[in-house]
Amino acid sequence: MSGLEKMKRQILEEADHSAEAEIEKAKAKAEELLEAAKAEADAAAEKILEQSEADIEILMERSASSCDMYRKKAMLKAKQEVIREVLEKAYEKIQELDAQEYFEMAEKLLAKYVLAQEGEVYFSKKDLERMPEGFEQKISQIAAQKGGALTVSQETRQIDGGFILVYGGIEENCTIKALFDAKRDELSDKVHSLLFA
């Protein structure tokens, strides 16, 4: 083997050895990079998992809150319906009172709404026809106690119960419907406290 071939072989051996060393370095570096990438991917996956769990928790809380709100709305609607039905039944009961009870109620309403002025009171045709004997005198007495005078008009009004007071052309609507409508919120609150307290 000539000196040239020896040199060639030595150069090749050194190149092989150097190449192997570089390959080993590259493999180690690739292994390092792979481990770092794996650790980074694991951290990212853990972060995504944590975020997903947090998102699921928030979604479940919102869903529970939404269900609770829907349930409360449904309960409120049902309560309002029950209260409305109770008030309707109370209104119907007043309409069905016998003449004695009805005019006792009318007497109390008159005592509350009569003014210390001269005026007239208007009833429905039905009430005018069934008015008990002596009731007109009671009306006069109630008005006198308040410092006024009140006469029963023979002209009727198309009302479903109660009466209309007229003082100097100004009407005070004391029909059962008007009184119910005016006191609806107060009556609703009372029925609510009786039924749902």
Image (tube, rainbow, N blue to C red):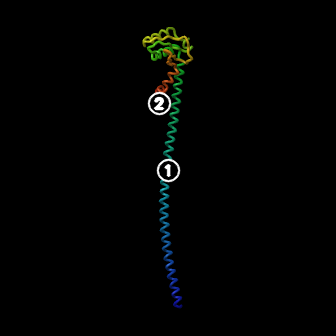
- Category of crowding for the residue at label 2, using alpha-carbon neighbours closer than 10 angstroms: few (below 14), some (14–19), many (at least 20): few
Nearest the camera: 47 or 148? 148
- Give the residue displayed 48% in from the left and 51% down from the top: 54
Dot in front, 2 or 1 = 1
**Residue 45 vertical placement versus 79 (above, below):** below
> Residue 104: x, y in percent?
48, 14
> CA separation, marks 2 and 1?
38 Å
Q: Disc number at residue 98?
A: none
- Category of crowding for the residue at label 1, using alpha-carbon neighbours closer than 10 angstroms: few (below 14), some (14–19), many (at least 20): few
**Residue 166 vertical placement versus 5 (above, below):** above
Residue assigned mark 2 = 196
Residue ranking furthest to the front:
168
Residue ranking furthest to the bottom:
2
> Residue 66: x, y in percent?
51, 42
> Residue 3: x, y in percent?
51, 90
SS state under label 1: helix
The C terminus appears in which quarter of the rendering? Answer: top left
Residue assigned mark 1 = 55
Residue type at the position of mark 1: Asp
Nearest the camera: 49 or 116? 116
Q: Which tag, 2 or 1, sits closer to the chain's start?
A: 1
The mark total stands at: 2
> Residue 189: x, y in percent?
46, 28
- Give the residue displayed 47% in from the left and 65% down from the top: 36
- Give the residue displayed 50% in from the left and 72% down from the top: 26
**Residue 105 vertical placement versus 68 (above, below):** above
Residue type at the position of mark 2: Phe
SS state under label 2: helix
Q: Do labels 2 and 1 touch, CB within 8 Å?
A: no
